[in-house]
Image: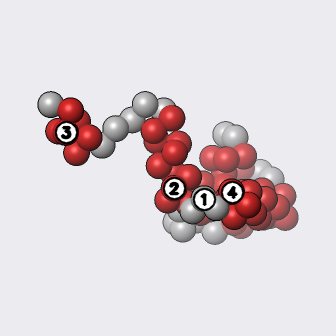
Amino acid sequence: MQKRDAVRLVESGNLTVRQVAEDLGISKATLSNWVDKARKERRDVGATPDLTAEIRRLSQGETSSSEWDAKS
């Protein structure tokens, strides 16, 4: 699992920093630093978590069903 995946687990709101850190066998402080850094980077570029997720989705070649309907 990569850092961004661990951060995504925390930011999904389903698991706490402590839970994710314990599951991955890393310290809570390390994971908190990763989360803080990711949030700061998004603020610096003006990206919200929703925008970041959408950019990731599009970069992986995924499209929504409404996009497919519009192309048909």
Q: Are marks 1 and 4 in contact (CB under 8 Å)?
A: yes
**Mark 2 — residue?**
51
* Mark linked to residue 70: 3
Crowd band around label 2 with a 10 angstrom C-alpha radius: few (<14), some (14–19), many (20+): few
Pick whichever, 36 or 50, lies toward us.
Answer: 50
- Kind of residue indicated by mark 1: Ala
**Mark 1 — residue?**
47
**Mark 4 — residue?**
45
Q: Earlier in the sequence, mark 2 or mark 4?
A: 4
Q: Are marks 2 and 1 in contact (CB under 8 Å)?
A: yes
Which residue lies at the image location 53% right of the left edge and 42% below the top edge?
56
Q: Is residue 41 visible?
A: yes
Question: Eyeballing the image, is 48 above or below 25?
Answer: below
Assign a secondary structure to mark 4: helix
Crowd band around label 3 with a 10 angstrom C-alpha radius: few (<14), some (14–19), many (20+): few
Disc 1 to disc 3, C-alpha distance: 26 Å
Assign a secondary structure to mark 1: loop
Residue 68 in the image, given as x and y percentages of width and height: 23, 36
Crowd band around label 4 with a 10 angstrom C-alpha radius: few (<14), some (14–19), many (20+): few
Q: Quadrant of the N terminus?
A: top right
